[in-house]
Image (spheres, rainbow, N blue to C red):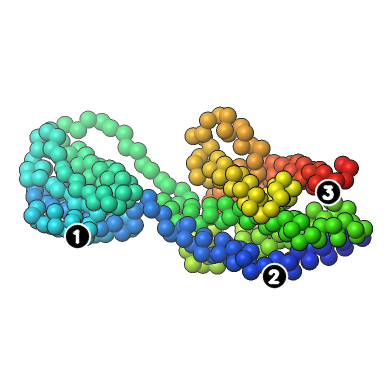
Amino acid sequence: MRPAATIYRLGIKELWSLARDPAMLILIVYTFTAAVYIAATAMPDALHKTPIAIVDEDDSPLSARIATAFYPPYFMPPAKLALSEVDPVLDAGEYSFVLDIPPGFQRDVLAGRSPAMQLNVDATRMSQAFTGSGYIQQIALGQVREFAQRYRARETPRADLELRVRFNPNLTQTWFGAVMEIIDNITMLSIILAGAALIREREHGTIEHLLAMPVTPAEIMLSKLWPMALVVLLATGVSLTFIVRGALQVPISGSAALFMACAAMHLFATTCMGIFMATLARSMPQLALLILLTLLPLQMLSGGMTPRESMPAFARNIMLAAPTTHFVSASQAILFRAAGLEVVWPQLLALACIGALFFGVALGRFRKSLGMPG
């Protein structure tokens, strides 16, 4: 019982140290509130109520069909303009896109010719212009193709592809962005807090005081892991409840309890990573550089930003040793697809094995940094 009591009391000391660090407290609150909300809603490549206008020089059923195909949430209801008004409204920045349908457009389509429509784009909104141009092209050509097939004299047999989007029917990027931001922040904050806890002891000169006490390096290390993991886990639960489900209205399909259990297993590995980095660094700036170099590949290659299937085989195989790969896979399955324990147990097992490995490596490095035999 003595080791458990020692780990508990030293952990309470870490919580009090964190409570007296306003910078860390502000970071925790911001990371799991404003940062999640901003990342989910401020996506520059997403179209949301984009202003568009149409110059209908054809005034035909086909041109009217094209005009009604643009609707919220991606586009505002299209405004009708005269051809002479195009340049002034684009110069004033009133519309991002102006689609010009030329005279005789429907007649040429039904005659089998390939008439051209003109799309005027305000390229000062660069990311929106690039994405929106592709959307408009697909929408307009799709309407033309369907209209022509209806009026074709001899319609050739064809197969239709009926799309059914599961888990996110409207392809709302907010749903994906909010959850992925929480996953990334769990990794980032757990490494920072665990590493900073050890660096703080070294900078304040209290690590020698701990060594003078009847405690082992393993007890010291565990006393820094569980309070930091607990803080991040509690912040995750609050963010998932009040920011994701509350403010952003993102539906969570699966079990929040199973996700929290998966997050706890992931925190075991990432806090050990933070302790290991703290044994390599000698100051907070050095620790920050190490974390920066580590977080970028962990976030970019774990499957959260880009599907792992589109990555080179070498990168996929290397990232199997990273806890974020398995955590992202399990979290997406639980929160998006309502997967149960029978589906995600391989990821949980992988996280447990990786966490145990990191714990052993971090403990060995911690003993070495203290000048103690392994």
Label 1's element?
loop
Nearer the viewer's eye, disc 3 or disc 1?
Answer: 3
Cα distance in 3D space between marks 2 and 3: 26 Å
Q: Which mark is residue 20?
A: 2
User: In the figure, is residue 34 to the left or right of 318?
Assistant: left
Q: Quadrant of residue 117?
A: top left
Q: Position of residue 126 (x, y in %)?
A: 31, 49
Which badge, 3 or 1, is on the more N-terminal residue?
Answer: 1
Mark 2–mark 1 distance (CA, rounded to whole Å): 52 Å
In the picture of the structure, the residue carrying the numbered disc 3 is 370
Asked if marks 2 and 1 touch (Cβ < 8 Å), the reply is no
Which residue was labeled with disc 1? Answer: 92
Q: Residue at x 61, y 63 (%)?
A: 28
Instruction: Report the amino acid beneath label 2.
Output: Arg
Of residue 22 and residue 135, the one placed in the foreground of this image is 22
For marks 2 and 3 on the same chain, the one whose residue lies earlier in the sequence? 2
Residue 350, above or below 49: above
Q: Earlier in the sequence, mark 2 or mark 1?
A: 2
User: For residue 106, which numbered disc appears in the image?
Assistant: none
